[in-house]
Image (cartoon, rainbow, N blue to C red):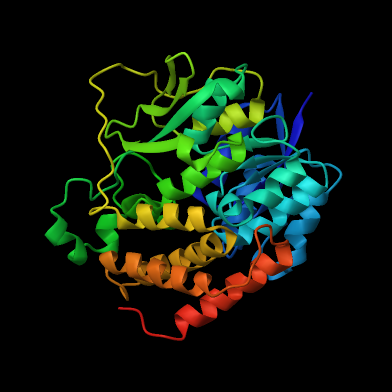
Amino acid sequence: MQARLAVLGATGSIGRQAIEVATAHRDRLRLVGLSCRTSAEACDALARDARARVVVAERDGDDAVIDLVRADDVDVVVVGIPGIAALRPTLAALDAGKTVAIAAKEVLVVGGHLVRERARQGAGERLRPVDSEHCALWQCLRGEDLDTVESVTLTASGGPFRDTPLEALPGMSAERALQHPTWHMGPKVTVDSATLVNKGYEVIEAHWLFDLPYTAVNAVIHPQSLVHALVRFADGSVKAQLADPDMRLPIQYALLYPERLESPVRRLELRDLSFLPIDPARYPCYTIVLEAASQGPAAMIAVNAADEIAVERFLHGDLAFTAIAGVLERALGIASRSPLGAAPDLASILAFDREVRRELTAKAMV
């Protein structure tokens, strides 16, 4: 039986690789619809090649994507849209009873309580993580009693500036930041990998996906990017998932779950593995995101909005790389004055996101 797919963010890195996986397994996966933001012509071409019948672009209005994820002939929605823009379609898909393969970290950062409530559980049949680290955790925890989990560890490559002298970081350009040593990703997540904002987000993701306290979720630098996550159990044993760093593998696992089928991913060659602690002087943004998580929804929404703004300005050459952390700190200050509760609804989340963006952009960033 074929699962019928809608891919949101089809022209991005995750979207294109999801289409590649679906095309390779046409006996089990059928592409029904694709969405994109502004690259409508590229999306049309992808749809023709993949034989998808529906293409939705920004020009079609906000509700067009919602209609796509709710369509009767869609079973699985791949959420590859970056940023808070992915929140509304993710919730709509879950409300419509669809399975969601989620790659958008920000959805769980700003609305994890809403996602978990609608999925009625964490990672599993209806909510399938596509991030390599969370897909790795999902595999390590499959068949295990969560009550026996002592801690989990996520790995990070350290990004392109892992070995750059600290005094040189202020002068690092967007071009340099986009030269990730391991993964080929979109520009936003690649910069977030350089600042380690993405790893802070992934700690929050793990909290929501696997119902883990923040104190049980750790992260380390692992330059080889072969170990994607580790789980330590109550008896002291540790289970890890290793694979060549190729996003097609977690995408395929999420789309074909619970089956494991052949893939073109290069087979792993074991070699030296090293693990290092995260240096807060090199990665202050990681510490800020964890602080936001400890403060609650307002802080997480504010930091996410700030990061989207700061990364865009950095990519356009209007903000120094090391100034991104300062923008995130300002966002924490805004959040500290917010009356937002512990479990805000969708409208409140989006309203506060807009408020934070207005306040941040009203003042110059340096």
**Image quadrant assignment for residue 323:** bottom left
Q: In the rendered image, is residue 225 in sight?
A: yes
**Image quadrant assignment for residue 84:** bottom right
Residue 102 percent across, percent down from the top left: 61, 43
Image point 56% across, 34% down: which residue?
A: 251
Image point 41% across, 46% down: which residue?
A: 199
Residue 213 percent across, percent down from the top left: 54, 39
- Which residue extends farthest right? 72
Q: In the rendered image, is residue 19 in sight?
A: no
Left/right of residue 248 with respect to residue 108 in the rendered view = left
Q: Answer above or below: position of 60 versus 101.
A: below
Q: Quadrant of the C terminus?
A: bottom left
Image point 83% across, 47% down: which residue?
A: 96
Image point 38% across, 72% down: which residue?
A: 313
Q: Answer above or below: position of 324 versus 92.
A: below
Left/right of residue 290 with respect to residue 93 in the rendered view = left
